[in-house]
Amino acid sequence: MEEFINVNKVRQAFSGATSSYDSHAELQREIGRRLLAHLDFTKITPTSILDIGCGTGFFTRLLADKYKKANLCAADISSTMVQHTRKASSRRWPWQGTNFHAVSNAMHLPFKDSSFDLVTSNLAMQWVPDPEKMMREMRRVLAPGGLILFSTFGRRTLVELKQTLAQINTGHASSVLPFPDVMSLGNSLSNLAVEAPVTDADLFTLTYQDSMGLVRELKGIGASAAAIQGRKGGLYGRALLRDIETHYHQHYCGDDGRIYATFEALYAQAWHKDAGYADREDIIPIQVI
């Protein structure tokens, strides 16, 4: 996806959305809760955790509550988001002061090999130009016997918006990122030096009073089309928004008059491939969908 993502604009969009993010991010929180539930299927007790793309810190705090004795490092492309995460918690984080990290690029993590027992990321990978490179970095910093666990949006996400844009003006269809499907994500994970890679998915249908409600939510969480390579800024112009509204109400409107939008969450996990893996008894496979 390198031709789609502009890293600097992603950083600017999420930094600008720090104050509004939480009021628009209930779906992100629900996906985070479901991602955390995957850990109920394993007896892993990590002593060091890395959370990549911490945002305002919701998933980071879930991890902190679950593993109270673990050293936890939160990282994000936006230093504003990292500062917000730090201030939103009463816990003294190991990365406070000069040791906290605002990662400029998840494809080049500033950590030594084998640094963490658990490496997580909740809905950050879709904003990385090369997701496979991010996965390789997650594997690189993972200690032997450790676990990678992450979520990202799947290809059915915002399918209504993408089809609407394609119908209105084919030049705008690329404003919706080409999210992966669950099979391609699983294949990418399998290419790493990992054991028992597992992927599964959830499908959500959210409703909005009108298409502007959807657009405001996307903008509120920093998902601005300004992050797309070649766009000059802003989500959509007024004329295009009027056309989107008309098309949505013609094709994607329920009996109650509300328009709807699909979001697909993909979840993935894999263990560090180490010599002791075959002897482990605490690994319970998760259903693959």
Image (cartoon, grey):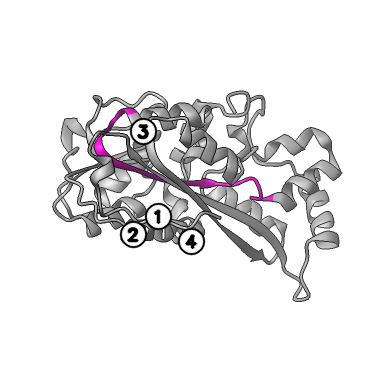
Residues drawn in magenta = 140-158
**Height in image: 222 above or below 90?**
above
Q: What SS does tag 1 mark?
A: loop
Residue 73 x %, y %: 24, 40
Q: Earlier in the sequence, mark 2 or mark 3?
A: 2
Whether pointer 1 and pointer 4 mark residues with C-beta atoms closer than 8 Å, the reply is no
Q: Residue at x 65, y 41 (%)?
A: 235
Q: Residues within 10 Å of mark 3 (few under 14, many from 20)?
A: many
According to the picture, the residue beneath numbered tag 1 turns out to be 285
> Which callout, 3 or 4, points to the residue nearer the camera?
3
Q: What SS does tag 4 mark?
A: helix
Residue 34 x %, y %: 43, 60
Residue 103 x %, y %: 35, 30
**Residue 177, numbered circle:** none
**Height in image: 106 above or below 264?**
above
Residue type for callout 2? Phe
**Residue 41, numbered circle:** 2
Residue 233 x %, y %: 63, 33
Residue type for callout 4? Glu
Whether pointer 2 and pointer 1 mark residues with C-beta atoms closer than 8 Å, the reply is yes
Visible in this render: residue 284? yes
Q: Is residue 156 magenta?
A: yes
**Residue 138, numbered circle:** 3
Considering every residue shown, the one lying at the far front of the view is 279
Residue type for callout 1? Pro
Marks 2/1: CA–CA distance: 8 Å
**Residue 26, numbered circle:** 4
Is residue 38 found left or right of 175 in the rendered image? Answer: left
Is residue 242 found left or right of 123 in the rendered image? Answer: right
> Which callout, 2 or 3, points to the residue nearer the camera?
2
Residue type for callout 3? Met
Q: What SS does tag 2 mark?
A: helix
